[in-house]
Every structure is written in structure tokens, then in C-alpha cells.
Amino acid sequence: MIRTATPDDVEKVGRIINILQVNRNDPGWKSSKDGLFEYPKSDEDIRSAINPFFTVAEGDDGIGGIDGILGYCLAYDSNFFRTNFGNIENLEWKSILDGPDKNYLYIDQLGVLKSWSLGAGRTANLLTDHAIISAREAGLQKILTYVCVEPLLNLKSVNFVEKKGFQRRGEISIENDVVLRSYELEL
């Protein structure tokens, strides 16, 4: 079941984010094909992001979970994004805030436990499909997201967003020699 995240989900989502972290200090990090590359979020970051487009997948489909949470989609519409994060200096966020002239949904993170499992693939699809439907129902015109491509090529995410119909729009270099590829889905 996909539902809107609540303050009760903050710690659980934070635990999933921590599990999915890939860091240059980790042995074998270069062989990773997915994960959140050096992109942690504090409980306060997660709490401040609660909005109608921030969803969690709840249930038990055999992949386990953290107190029933199998994954999450941390997303914001353009109004929430500009109001709450417009003064943040992240280069990737600045390019989104300064770029599109349309109303959009920005998917900041999509995280699913045990990404190698079939259940995780279903969960990722459900979360993304829910985001697409919710964005259309809200009258948004596009969905934007970034995927890390250097120094870690997040191959699973690249394949996933391209299979969902997102179009590659360019790349941006951010701090710590990280390169993100931007993707866009017109609705």
C-alpha cells in the first residue's frame, strides 16, 4: 500500500536512507550498482520534507521492511520546493529552482530495501506510478529527478527511470566530484 508519509515515518525512512548509503570510505563501493551515493538526510531533513507527495510503501511482500515500511519516494511539487528549499545552495537544487518554468514534481530520493529482489522492483514501480498519477491529478506538467553517474554509476536507477519513460536532459557536477544526470518526464 502506498500512502502519504507522516511524522511517525521519519525515523523509519531515515533508517532506510542509512541502509542505502554508499560512501567512498566503504570497502568495495566502486562495485555498487545502486544506492544513495553520499546523500544522507537527518531526521530533521526528512521531517521538513513531509508534504502530500512524500510517500511510503507499506506492507509485507516477503522482502521484510522497517516496521512495515518497504520503501519511500521523497518528492515535492514546485511550490513546496521553492517555498521550503529555495534558499539552499545545493547546485542540483539551484538548477531545478532556476530552470523549469512549468509546475513540476521533483523526486529527490526513491529508496527501496533489498533492491536486488523482485519485491523491491514492484515496490519501486508502485511508488513511482503513484508519484506520476498524483502529479497528473495535481495538474503538474512534468517530473524531474537526478541520478548519480560519477564516481558511482547508479545503473539500476538509470535503467529504471529510462524504462519509466524519463528523458535524459543533461549532467551537472556538484561538490566532491559527483556528477548527476538529470531526467525529465513530461506529463
Image (spheres, helix red, strand yellow):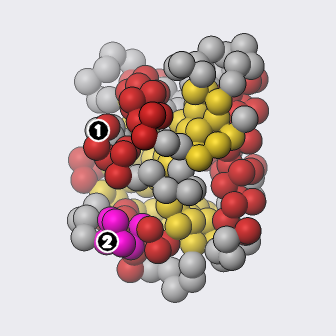
Where on the picture, by quarter, is residue 125?
A: top right
Sequence order check, earlier mark of 1 and 2: 1
Place of residue 61 in the rendered image (x, y in percent of width and height, measured from the top left): 74, 19
Residue 124 vs 138, above or below: the answer is: above
Q: Where's the C terminus, which quadrant?
A: bottom right
- Image point 73% across, 68% down: which residue? 137
Label number found at residue 42? 1
Per the rendered image, the range of residues in magenta is: 81-86
Q: Which residue is mark 2?
A: 86
Amino acid, disc 2: Gly
Magenta stretch, main secondary structure class: helix
Q: Label for residue 123?
A: none
How busy is the neighbourhood of tag 2: few (under 14 within 10 Å), some, or many (20 plus)?
some
The secondary element bearing badge 1 is classed as loop
Q: Position of residue 46 (x, y in %)?
A: 37, 44
The alpha-carbon separation of the residues under discs 1 and 2 comes to 19 Å
Q: Is residue 93 left or right of residue 101?
A: left
Q: Give the quarter of the figure containing the N terminus.
A: top right
Viewer-side residue, 66 vs 29:
66
- Residue 115: % across, % down: 61, 26
Residue 143, quarter of picture = bottom right
Badge 2 marks a residue whose secondary structure is: loop
Q: Residue furthest bottom?
A: 101
Q: Position of residue 50 (x, y in %)?
A: 45, 51
**In this rendering, does residue 21 appear at all?**
no
Q: Does the magenta portion include 84?
A: yes
**Callout 1, which amino acid?**
Ser
